[in-house]
Amino acid sequence: MKPTTHTIEHEQERAVLVSLVTPDLKRQEAYSPEYSLNELVSLAETAGVIVLDTLSQNRETVDTKWFIGKGKAEELKQLLDEHNANTAIFDQELSGAQVRNLEQFLDVKIIDRTQLILDIFAGRAKTREGIIQVELAQLSYLLPRLSGQGANLSRLGGGIGTRGPGETKLETDRRHIRNRISELKQQLQEVVRHRTLHRERRKKTGVFQVALVGYTNAGKSTLLKQLTQADVYVENQLFATLDPTSRTFELPGGKEIVLTDTVGFIQNLPHDLVAAFRATLEEACEADLILHVVDASSEMMDTQMKVVDQVLRELGAHGKERITLFNKVDLCTPEQVEMLTTEGEFLRISAYREEDLQRIGELIEARLMGECKTFRIPAEKGDMISLVYRVGEVLENEVDGGDMLLQVRVNNKEYDKLGYLLAAYAMDQAQNEGENSEHV
């Protein structure tokens, strides 16, 4: 990557990006060194950093003191001086000792991929829940790195720009930080409690929940906006939206469901972030159906899909019913579109085509509402008939002698539940009638 000339303000971060590739990283199924470094460039630019150059190194193991080794650190120092850079951003997570050693030797701000992502999230969080989750993730990340920081703490706490917790807020005191983490966890538990109550309320009313998941910038927010006319922020950048958004979506048959957009996934999503955002990401675990939105125009589509699978597995949502939506097919060639395929049900779509939005609604309806079944219930059993109306969608009803014939659309899971309840009800009634007869 050639140096770029910029007219910039003194305070703006001007960075050289650094990547260390080890055999362990190469063996990871969803890891590509070139793509990860290119993604780091996008992350840095999203955070408002001017990227001046990149530096890569292949090593058998990580250097415990310098991360990239003393010789490569000297090469990095020359590169930073050559570009008059004031920041070095590493593609992998650094320990506190490595940050201190590199800062003292290079005399620039040192930031790793985890902190960069946390800083971006800090700038995007708008709701109380999002702000709590980001601060919790930042403090959990910083706590083990505070010991012996001295003058370097302000750099480490500051992150990109001024979005980090900062030296004043952290108070340089581990005990105070632990207390703050405890407070945030309690606040987050309250958020989880409210979210759980909302979920239970939705379940009682029979409202289906569908979650949009996918790699960052796959087009989830655009799809939510197009399907529901939601007033959500849409931009062609990483993590354009952070806080989850739920909107009502009416299926072609008239039934309403709740459609939720979740935070985008990314390679090496920080563990502190996954832990802090578990309350939000659990929307995917609780959903009746997951829509996996894929950027079909991305050269790294397969890798991105593997990353999403990996995160869903970590969340315990990997076994959920899923439909894959290959989005942005309008940016692909006809040959590329034909090659888009995966296990299970999938659609090739553009979020801007009305006919594709209609197909999505029809497929969701077919998956959630299921097939048409016929139930014959004695007309005097009003509570049993009410149960059928609550669980399924009654398309037709007619009287046949002393029975009600109900044509009901119901998915397999609800059909099994309904069959069990009706059978149990019939047995109870038969038992009661038997007891009454004995009593007489």
Image: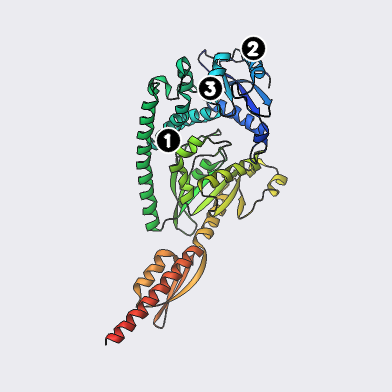
What is the CA distance from the residue labelled 3 to the residue labelled 2? 26 Å
**Which is nearer the eye, 209 or 281?**
281
Residue 297 in view (yes/no): no
Q: Secondary structure at mark 1?
A: helix
Mark 3 lies on residue: 97
* Earlier sequence position, callout 3 versus callout 1: 3
Mark 2 lies on residue: 82
* Earlier sequence position, callout 3 versus callout 2: 2
Q: Amino acid at mark 3?
A: Ala
Q: Quick one: which residue is furthest to the bottom in this view?
A: 440
Classed neighbour count for the residue bearing mark 3: other residues with Cα under 10 Å, few (<14), some (14–19), many (≥20): some
Quadrant including the C terminus: bottom left
What is the CA distance from the residue labelled 1 to the residue labelled 2? 39 Å
Give x and y (percent) for residue 269.
54, 36
Based on the displayed image, in which of its 4 quarters is residue 205 positioned?
Answer: bottom left
Residue at horizontal 51%, vertical 53%? 289
28 displayed left or right of 135: right
Residue 223 in view (yes/no): yes
Q: Nearer the viewer, mark 3 or mark 1?
A: 3
Residue at horizontal 50%, vertical 45%? 224
* Earlier sequence position, callout 1 versus callout 2: 2
Residue at horizontal 67%, vertical 36%? 26
Q: Amino acid at mark 1?
A: Gln
Give x and y (percent) for residue 219.
56, 41
Give x and y (percent) for residue 297.
65, 40
Q: Quick one: which residue is furthest to the left in this view?
A: 440
Give x and y (percent) for residue 273.
48, 36
Q: Does 399 sit above or below residue 145?
A: below
Mark 1 lies on residue: 133
Q: Does 285 sit above or below residue 84?
A: below
Cβ atoms under marks 3 and 1 closer than 8 Å: no
